[in-house]
Image (cartoon, rainbow, N blue to C red):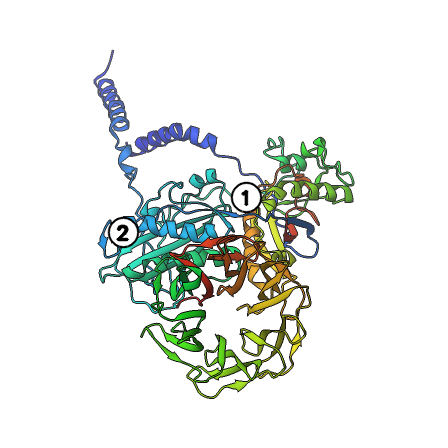
Amino acid sequence: MIERRDITGLSVAILGHAGLIAAIYFWPWHEKEKPLTPPEPIQVTLADDVGLVSAAPDPSDQPPAEATQGEDVPDDTDIAPPESAPEPKEQPKPTPPRTNSETSKPPPPANRNQQAQQNRGNPRPGLNLDDSTLRGNGPAREKTDGQGTKSQATMTGDALMNITTAIKRQVQPCADRQVVPAPEASQIIAVVQLKLRPDGALDSVRIVDHKGVNESNQRYVARVDDAVEAIFAACTPIRGLPAELYDVPRGWRSLKFNYRLTN
Amino acid sequence: MRKVLAIATAAVLMISAGPALAQTPTPTPTPTPTGQDGGDDDLVIDLEGGRSSALPIIIPVMPTNAVTGTPAGSTDALGRQLSAIIDDDLRNTGLFKTVGPNAARPIGYAEVNAPDYGSWDAYASQALVQGYVRANGNGTLTIGCYVYDVASRRQLIREGFVVQPSEWRRAAHKCADAIYTRLTGDGPYFDSQIVYVSETGPKNRRIKRLAIMDQDGANHRFLTNGQRIVLTPRFSPDQRQIVYMGYENKRPAIYVHDIAARTSRLLVPDVNLNFAPRFSPDGRWILFSMAKAGNTDLYRIAAGGGAAQQLTTSPGIDTGGSYSPDGSKIVFESDRGGTQQLYVMDGNGGNQHRISFGGGRYATPSWSPRGDLIAYTRTGGGAFRIGVMSPAGGGERTLTESWGDEGPSWAPNGRVLMFFRAASGSGRPDLWSVDLSGHSRRIPTPLDGSDPSWGPIRP
């Protein structure tokens, strides 16, 4: 026998569920999403207008500002950048690498560096750039701090020669494409500090010194520097270098080139 | 109820966010720098490479923000002409292989300072020139000149020039000069002028007139009417005057022509034979030769006139004097040793010494504006050729291989020379230019041309 009290309770329960379903169904989830808005157009500011001597206006319809002849060219920073994209949400910070005893299951290897890290405990002196090395069967790495690891591998003479050969083989075509402006330019040696990323991509290129510069070839220094920029922009990333020897003394993370523009 | 809704909402969110969470990469430790910022421990690699060939460069038509009529033509037509002039300037040097406005794809106005590098990769070029034309409200034109390195995706040049419509060609030359200077390392020379002797008529009744033109042959005009034969014109450093040798009543004398006033004045009122004049680099003096009592020596006289000062005294013919760029020395030709050879002396005539010792004869020396070379005409074996040597002597290089080349004059950058070449058979002279690399080309003139003098870069 259903009592009046039960009927009331059942009715309340049914109404409650119906209300919940209706609430879930009709809740305005999409109203919380911001509508897509087109990016703000780039604001172009007209640089100082120019005389016949030297200047650099931007191609803008805006009226030119006053300028004097011989005025320095304004930097490209005069051009307002587009509105910056919203900051991405902060990703979880990487946790320090765990020791074998701390982790029940090692993470799957994501790249050669990580593969190399797994081979902990099997260090071997020296390296050859054979397939086993490139597959990650190289030397183990040791834990250096709470954030990263450092290879225990050492650079041997053979490895040095092989890496040098591999790098030169890949950048030489771009070096050969550079035009020698005059024979005197070939006396100049640009000392170049090159930083590579673990994937062989160009991190930075910096010309730290020039040798062989004299009065007759001084005017070609800028052209030699241009050639340096063009070579390493066009012929990177450098492929096939052993990950184990990236961040070791005399490794390929940081390279120094003595470059001569000659044919 | 509120609590129930919150739980349900959380459940829905969990369900909908599930795939996204599943795709979030697990953060993995990455190797961090270990203090190697580059130094003596770096792996050192010696790298050599390059080629001696023309530098490939793309020169599309310069777009305009709005097609507007100007006294120089509509801005869109000007954009095409400006690009064509830059193309000609660069290609004619022999140092550039151009993809000109007829071959390069057109660009939009907004693309000028934001190049689409990827679209140019197919051209296999090293440099890209993008400019624009804009008519200003005050009647002037603004010509923008941007140059990019296609390989390194960098801007190399960002200049612009505001000119009167009548001088639009100069803006193209200025842009080409900026490109040439940046990409070769050598100085500019496209925005400069040439004065020379324009010749016409039969050999025995040759009409010779002073003429002036842009270095590419444009804007040609005559300065004298041909009633007086003229020879060896030379620019003043400020380009306002031209000193030359003229025959008045069949008697040679030195005159100074004022370009703006279009008048000539006699410089050396002397009964003796005066010839081969040339300004000093500071414009204060004019060097010349005077034949007196059977001996020809070098003299100098103030550019405004006055008493001449004798610089050489040796027996023989001393002529063809040319100052070093700092004015401290003079190179000249002399036959005091038996044959025509080159000598160098101090600006006051002291310390005279011979610098050429090759076979044949050396004549018409010209000291480079860079100071590092002396150009000359060398004769031997029945041929006249243009060559260069060190001011100290030695390091001789012959630049031309024709049989009738003479009278070299340096471009303002000291890398290019103009001279005149007699055609085989007719002997009719034409103007030619030659780069120190040996690349030569004929300079177009309406009539025959000889005795060129290259003026400095225009301000």
Q: Residue furthest front?
A: B204
Q: Secondary structure at mark 2?
A: helix
Q: Is residue A150 above or below residue B290?
A: above
Kindly identify the residue that appears in the image at 47 percent across and 65 percent down: B451
Q: Residue furthest bottom?
A: B307
Left-right relation of B94 to A33 = right
Residue under numbered circle 1: A234
Q: Chain of mark 1?
A: A
Q: Which amino acid is tagged 2? A: Thr
Name the front one of labels 2 and 1.
Answer: 2
Report whether mark 2 lies on the same chain as mark 1: no
Q: Residue furthest top?
A: A1
Kindly identify the residue that appears in the image at 28 percent across and 27 percent down: A24
Q: Which amino acid is tagged 1? A: Ala
Observer-nearest of B431 and B230: B230
Pinpoint residue A55: horizontal percent, then vertical percent: 38, 62
Left-right relation of A238 to B416 = right
Residue under numbered circle 2: B75
Quarter-wise, where is residue A94 in the image?
top right
Kindly identify the residue that appears in the image at 42 percent across and 29 percent down: B18
Tell me if mark 1 has few (under 14), some (14-19) or many (20+) residues whose alpha carbon lies within 10 angstroms of its own: some
Pinpoint residue B236: horizontal percent, then vertical percent: 43, 74
Q: Chain of mark 2?
A: B
Observer-nearest of B201 and B335: B201
Q: Please say if the residues under marks 2 and 1 sit with CB atoms less than 8 Å apart.
A: no
Q: Is residue B327 above or below residue B131?
A: below
